[in-house]
Image (cartoon, rainbow, N blue to C red):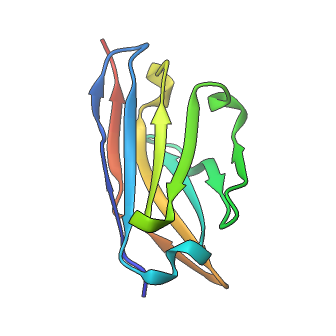
């Protein structure tokens, strides 16, 4: 069983920055492919960024150049640095871990971008 706990969300003005963290409870973290997803009100959950166990990264087009995903296997943690935030980035952000055929999710952290 993999437990994931996100933190770092909050209210920020447009153009501001936030850093989300996801800490895992399992020693197999280093073997997991990880990702950040988000879900805005009335919309489907969408993939924001991924980072493989080998630290290869991908980003959805709308966040390229603004968001950076990273991981620290020693701390069993994954991060999402979000810069130049826009109102359309407002959503609940979820941490995801993929190990084998199993997907694990955190409880989510709210990010609100508003003036």
Q: Split into 4 quadrants, where in the image is the C terminus?
A: top left
Rendered residue at 33%/30% (across/down)? 112
Rendered residue at 57%/57% (across/down)? 35
How far across and how far down the image is residue 15, in percent?
A: 43, 13
Question: Looking at the image, is 52 positioned above or below residue 27?
Answer: above
How far across and how far down the image is residue 31, in percent?
A: 61, 77
Question: Looking at the image, is 52 positioned above or below residue 113?
Answer: below
In the image, 18 versus 53, the foreground residue is 53
> How many tags in the picture?
0
Q: Quadrant of residue 33?
A: bottom right
Q: Quadrant of residue 9?
A: top left
Q: Split into 4 quadrants, where in the image is the N terminus?
A: bottom left
How far across and how far down the image is residue 20, in percent?
A: 39, 44
The residue most toward the bottom is: 1
In the image, 8 versus 70, the foreground residue is 70
Q: In this rendering, would 91 be left or right of 12?
A: right
The residue most toward the front is: 74
Q: In this rendering, would 54 be left or right of 113?
A: right
How far across and how far down the image is residue 43, in percent?
A: 53, 44
Rendered residue at 50%/25% (across/down)? 88
Q: In this rendering, would 25 be left or right of 30?
A: left
In the image, 61 versus 99, the foreground residue is 99
Rendered residue at 60%/49% (across/down)? 46
């Amino acid at each position: 069983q993999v437990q994931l706990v996100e933190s770092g969300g909050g209210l920020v003005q447009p153009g501001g920055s936030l850093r989300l963290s996801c800490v895992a409870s399992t020693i197999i973290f280093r073997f997991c492919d990880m990702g950040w997803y988000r879900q805005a009100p009335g919309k489907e959950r969408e993939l924001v960024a991924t980072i493989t166990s080998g630290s290869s990264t991908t980003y959805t087009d709308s966040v390229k150049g603004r968001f950076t995903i990273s991981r620290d296997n020693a701390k069993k943690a994954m991060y999402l640095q979000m810069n130049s935030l826009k109102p359309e980035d407002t959503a609940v952000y979820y941490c995801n871990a993929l190990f084998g055929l199993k997907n694990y999710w955190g409880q989510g952290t709210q990010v609100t971008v508003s003036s």
